[in-house]
Image: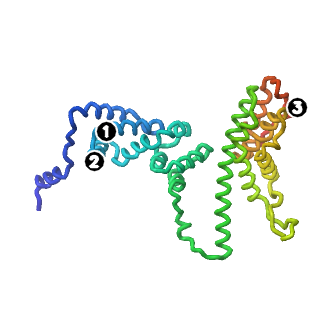
């Protein structure tokens, strides 16, 4: 049986040896330590800052000693240190977009090990307005199957067909939301220019939203329109008119028109159509009726009331400008 002194001696023997750092490197490591301790590491910009300083220490310390120094001196685990260094080394070209989108460092840890095309895919989703969790980003980057998909047997039956249809509808709705939010962002920017009396180039706006609106129209038609027999020799089924809510039927038709820029109104009618019809529809599709009847729709109306006269943009009809907007309680 060991005595107390023997146990303490054995315990002290297991402690990691004191690191021997070259005297010429110590000022740099002290500077890195002070800089890292002053950063909270909660934002994308701060994550890049921590990664930059750890990469400076990486230059003068061997790999094994670097992890030990990060854990014993800076209070980070070696794995966290490697993650922050990877952010600095692999995501530098995406820094402005990551900071503008306020991406969390935990999400950036996953992106730092992803391929460029996967990083672009995730950034497009985030910039479209979607809030992605770490698990969702891992799924997009690595394409991991969910446990339900892995265990699902390749069998027939109506129950399996129903589950497959529900999974498809869920994915289509998620994609529809991403596409409409991307279009809404561009239309809001165009409406802001209109409110200041500036011109909005139709071709430039079409290049930004035409494809998204065309795809969103197809997804929405697939979700709300039943299949019926069409007038053809083979009797194939085709999508009919959208059923259910009149709001969604109107949204589908307007999205279809947005996906075909030659069918947009002329130069004189275009600003009023964009703010009075397109903007409320996209906001309603993304955020529900509360946006149409609430502050956002009133804001869209007020944008027209405050417009300065412009030689290429006529004033709105009196019926549009003077109609009161009531909110349901």
Q: Position of residue 97 (x, y in %)?
A: 54, 39
The quadrant of the picture occupied by the C terminus is: top right
Q: Is residue 321 left or right of residue 290?
A: right
Q: Which residue sits at x=36%, y=32%?
A: 35
When asked about the image quadrant of residue 25, the answer is top left
Query: What is the distance, in whole Å, between disc 1 and disc 3 at their CAs?
Result: 68 Å
Query: What is the distance, in whole Å, between disc 2 and disc 3 at their CAs?
Result: 73 Å
Q: Nearer the viewer, residue 140 or 43?
A: 140
Q: Which residue is mark 2?
A: 64
Q: Position of residue 55 (x, y in %)?
A: 36, 39
Query: Dots 2 and 1: beta carbons under 8 Å?
Result: no
Q: Is residue 51 left or right of residue 296?
A: left
When asked about the image quadrant of residue 316, the answer is top right
Q: Which residue is mark 1?
A: 59
Dot label at residue 264: none
Q: Nearer the viewer, residue 145 or 92?
A: 92
**First in sequence: mark 2 vs mark 3:** 2
The quadrant of the picture occupied by the N terminus is: bottom left
Q: Secondary structure at mark 1?
A: helix
Q: Is residue 280 left or right of residue 17?
A: right
Query: Dots 1 and 3: beta carbons under 8 Å?
Result: no
Q: Nearer the viewer, residue 183 or 132?
A: 183
Labels 1, 3: front one: 1
């Amino acid at each position: 049986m060991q005595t107390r002194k023997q146990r303490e001696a054995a315990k002290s023997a297991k402690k990691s040896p004191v690191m021997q750092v070259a005297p010429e490197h110590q000022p740099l490591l002290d500077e890195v330590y002070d800089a890292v301790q002053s950063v909270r590491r909660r934002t994308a910009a701060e994550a890049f800052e921590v990664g930059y300083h750890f990469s400076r220490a990486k230059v003068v310390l061997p790999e094994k000693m670097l992890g030990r120094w990060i854990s014993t001196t800076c209070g980070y685990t070696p794995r966290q240190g490697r993650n922050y260094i990877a952010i600095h080394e692999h995501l530098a070209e995406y820094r402005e977009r990551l900071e503008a989108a306020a991406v969390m460092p935990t999400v950036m840890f996953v992106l730092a090990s992803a391929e460029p095309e996967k990083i672009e895919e995730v950034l497009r989703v985030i910039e479209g307005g979607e809030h992605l969790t770490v698990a969702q980003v891992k799924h997009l980057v690595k394409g991991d199957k969910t446990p339900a998909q892995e265990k699902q047997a390749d069998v027939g039956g109506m129950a399996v067909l129903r589950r497959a249809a529900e999974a498809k509808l869920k994915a289509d709705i998620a994609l529809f939301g991403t596409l409409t939010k991307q279009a809404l962002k561009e239309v809001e920017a165009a409406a802001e220019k209109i409110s200041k009396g500036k011109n909005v180039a139709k071709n430039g706006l079409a290049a930004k939203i035409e494809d998204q609106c065309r795809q969103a129209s197809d997804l929405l038609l697939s979700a709300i329109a039943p299949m019926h027999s069409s007038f053809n020799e083979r009797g194939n089924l085709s999508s009919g008119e959208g059923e259910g809510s009149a709001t969604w039927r109107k949204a589908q038709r307007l999205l279809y028109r947005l996906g075909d820029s030659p069918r947009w109104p002329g130069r004189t009618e275009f600003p009023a159509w964009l703010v009075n019809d397109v903007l409320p529809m996209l906001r309603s599709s993304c955020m529900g009726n509360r946006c149409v009847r609430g502050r956002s729709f009133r804001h869209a109306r007020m944008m027209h009331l405050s417009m300065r006269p412009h030689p290429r943009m006529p004033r709105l009809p009196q019926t549009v400008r003077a109609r009161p907007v009531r909110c349901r309680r």
